[in-house]
Image (cartoon, grey):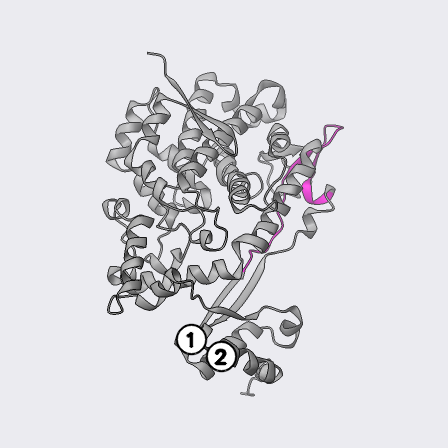
């Protein structure tokens, strides 16, 4: 029986098209749960339009993954050298299988997300657990295996896991070069469609232009390319996802969009303090101060249950988490007392920590919060096919990529009841607080 085709309207991609097998996944409990997981936690308290969910984001990632696969595997886009390194490209049945696995992996890549997505994930899961591990648990569950067995041809759950979470998060699994490239289509630092969709979607709903870039041009110029002869990309001869020279500016725009979205939206200080208040609430409200990691408990916990708990706790002073819940509901969030300043860091490399410690000593620990994010070092590199057919390192041909800043943010927050007092105190004591502590001689 021919697969029935379905289409879903989408504000970013106009239409997302899927067949009856993919519709089974969409209709599953695991995927439908994503209708109740906000993409950007409580950002809607700052950017009212950001009420979009992981559900539509995952549909968008599937749509883009299919587009990228079709572009990079089309006959005219593959060089003889790459064909020798990746014989899978010339196996028609294999291509059909892997295209299906890739789209299913893209659809399922976020099913393990906790309520309100990334907010406080590290603090609220046991050690060695994250949303990728929960995603793997659900993909490999008996309930999902029934779906994979009914797909034509049947899909191996382990293949979907590999492509959905990638080599870094599935380090216990052995990846072929082909599987690594396919996983990069979803999770890659340079061209991952997860990133493409969330930048486009988040900027659209936030009402900002920072996350926009020419993704049509970018996708049309993506290629599987051998590494540069000098090994500038990663010191390996293995092929990787790269780009034709004509798409380099679109790739630069993608990475700049990420930096600007981090600066202007994701690390907006009010957005961040609501994440902290949410974490404080959950640590008091959840049994054992942690989310459960078994599949059934995970499936039963969404933003809806958490929000109901917040509303109840905000109304009743004797409820666990009353204070942070009250701050969320009544918008009485902590205020910014200190923001990272490069001049301060020159005086004291732990300037933010020094202000935080001094503020706790002065005003008491309950009245002060700190938020720190230091972006990962290392520059994003990938192969670029030049007009003359030679392969070069992106960092060697781009004047932009080597200069994309590393996102670093640090805030110290204060209870609004102490804001005026604390601001005056910091103005008067700043120089003394920022004096570096001298280490005593042994």
**From which residue to which does the magenta span run?**
374-396
- Residues 394 and 356: in front is 356
Residue 152 shows up from this direction: yes
Seen at 40% across and 34% down, the residue is 107
Question: Vertical placement of 162 versus 85: above or below?
Answer: below
- Where residue 299 appears, as percent x and y from the top left, is 27, 44
Seen at 45% across and 55% down, the residue is 45
Q: Are marks 2 and 1 in contact (CB under 8 Å)?
A: yes
Residue receiving disc 2? 359
Q: Is residue 219 magenta?
A: no
Seen at 59% across and 57% down, the residue is 407
Residue receiving disc 1? 367
- Where residue 289 appears, as percent x and y from the top left, is 29, 62
Residue at the extreme top of the image, as rendered: 1
Secondary structure beneath disc 2? helix
Neighbourhood count class around disc 2 (C-alpha, 10 Å): few under 14, some 14–19, many 20 upward? many
Q: Mark 2 vs mark 1: which is more N-terminal?
A: 2
- Residues 442 and 92: in front is 92
Q: Is residue 395 magenta?
A: yes
The span from disc 2 to disc 1 (Cα, nearest Å) is 9 Å
């Amino acid at each position: 029986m021919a697969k029935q085709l379905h289409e879903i309207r989408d504000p970013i991609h106009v239409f997302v098209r899927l067949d009856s097998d993919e519709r089974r996944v969409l209709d599953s409990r695991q995927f439908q749960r994503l209708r109740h997981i906000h993409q950007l936690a409580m950002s809607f308290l700052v950017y009212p339009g950001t009420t979009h969910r992981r559900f539509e984001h995952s549909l968008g990632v599937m749509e883009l993954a299919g587009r990228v696969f079709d572009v990079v595997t089309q006959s005219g886009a593959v060089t003889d050298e790459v064909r020798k390194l990746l014989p899978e490209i010339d196996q028609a049945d294999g291509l059909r299988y892997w295209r299906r696995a890739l789209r299913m992996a893209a659809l399922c890549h976020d099913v393990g997300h906790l309520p309100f997505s990334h907010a406080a994930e590290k603090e609220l899961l046991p050690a060695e657990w994250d949303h990728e591990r929960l995603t793997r648990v659900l993909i490999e569950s008996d309930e999902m295996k029934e779906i994979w067995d009914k797909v034509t041809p049947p899909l191996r759950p382990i293949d979907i896991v590999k492509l959905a979470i990638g080599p870094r998060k599935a380090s216990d699994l052995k990846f072929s070069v082909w599987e690594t490239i396919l996983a990069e289509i979803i999770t890659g630092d340079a061209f991952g469609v997860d990133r493409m969709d969330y930048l486009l979607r988040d900027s659209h709903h936030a009402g900002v232009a920072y996350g926009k870039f020419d993704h049509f041009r970018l996708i049309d110029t993506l290629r599987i390319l051998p590494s540069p002869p000098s090994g500038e990309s990663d010191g390996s001869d293995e092929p990787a996802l790269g780009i034709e020279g004509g798409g380099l500016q679109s790739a630069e725009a993608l990475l700049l969009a990420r930096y600007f979205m981090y600066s202007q939206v994701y690390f907006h200080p009010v957005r961040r303090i609501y994440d902290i208040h949410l974490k404080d609430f959950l640590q008091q409200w959840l049994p054992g101060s942690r989310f459960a990691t078994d599949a059934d408990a995970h499936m039963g916990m969404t933003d809806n249950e958490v929000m109901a708990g917040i509303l109840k706790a905000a109304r009743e002073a004797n409820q666990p988490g009353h204070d942070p819940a009250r701050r969320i509901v009544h918008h009485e969030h902590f205020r910014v007392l200190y923001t990272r300043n490069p001049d301060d860091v020159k005086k004291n490399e732990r300037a933010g920590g020094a202000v935080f410690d001094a503020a706790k000593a002065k005003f008491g620990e309950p009245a002060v919060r700190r938020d720190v994010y230091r972006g990962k070092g290392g520059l994003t590199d990938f192969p670029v096919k030049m007009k003359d057919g030679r392969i070069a390192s992106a960092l060697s041909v781009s004047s932009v990529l080597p200069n994309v800043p590393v996102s670093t943010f640090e805030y110290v927050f204060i209870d609004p009841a102490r804001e005026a007092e604390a601001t005056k105190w910091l103005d008067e004591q700043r120089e003394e607080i920022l004096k570096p502590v001298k280490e005593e001689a042994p």
